Amino acid sequence: MIEIFHAPGHNIPEIHLHTLLKKEDDKEFVLCSQALLGTFLDGLIIYYRGELKKEAIQSGPVKITNNDVLRKIRIALMYQDSDMLEIFKLSEMEISKSELSAFFRRKSHKHYKACGDQFLRHFLQGLSLYKKRPVQQETVSRTEKVWVKRNK
């Protein structure tokens, strides 16, 4: 996580990171600020996808919405609609493809839908299950390159 924070050029002391990861009922718990959350999500994109273009980096205080969190995680992990729907399904919340696409529309679009806390909570819960699930791997070797196919 320290490496993810360092990617967009933000230094965070390890002790501060530990306080952010504490449970809410712990006396040393510190709430993560909007700016720090934005930095982490930008760092996550850089960590998985590579360096961002200079124009893509936003400067100044920005309010991060649940829709932004979903969008940035989707970009970082290169998820398609099917992956996102499967993640929601793992957390026992089934949503339609059109409902999911409404989260990624512009606020001015007539079919835009704000992502509620419950949707984000279920998505994050499903994401942890999705990442921990056992994966069947089929390895194919061609000219010294190895591809790993995921069978769902």
Image (tube, rainbow, N blue to C red):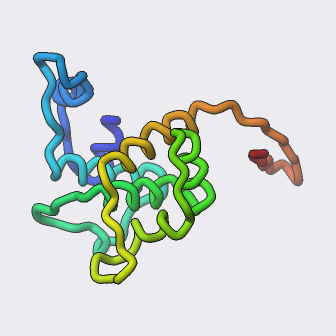
Examine the rendered structure and indicate whether residue 26 appears above or below residue 148.
above
Q: Quadrant of the N terminus?
A: top left
Residue 145 shown left or right of residue 96 in the figure: right
Residue 60 shown left or right of residue 135 in the figure: left
Q: Quadrant of the C terminus?
A: top right
Image position, residue 70 (x, y; %): 39, 56
Q: Residue at x 51, y 39 (%)?
A: 91
Examine the rendered structure and indicate whether residue 117 appears above or below residue 97.
above
Residue 54 shown left or right of residue 62 in the figure: right
Image position, residue 99 (x, y; %): 48, 66
Q: Is residue 97 visible?
A: yes
Examine the rendered structure and indicate whether residue 10 appears above or below residue 51.
above
Image position, residue 109 (x, y; %): 34, 82
Furthest residue toward top:
27
Residue 79 shown left or right of residue 102 in the figure: right
Q: Residue at x 35, y 83 (%)?
A: 110
Q: Residue at x 51, y 53 (%)?
A: 77
Q: Residue at x 84, y 41 (%)?
A: 138
Task: Work out whether residue 131 or residue 67 is closer to the camera in this orientation and state it.
Answer: 67
Residue 79 found in image quarter? bottom right
Count of labels in the image: 0
Image position, residue 88 (x, y; %): 52, 48
Q: Is residue 42 visible?
A: no
Residue 103 found in image quarter? bottom left
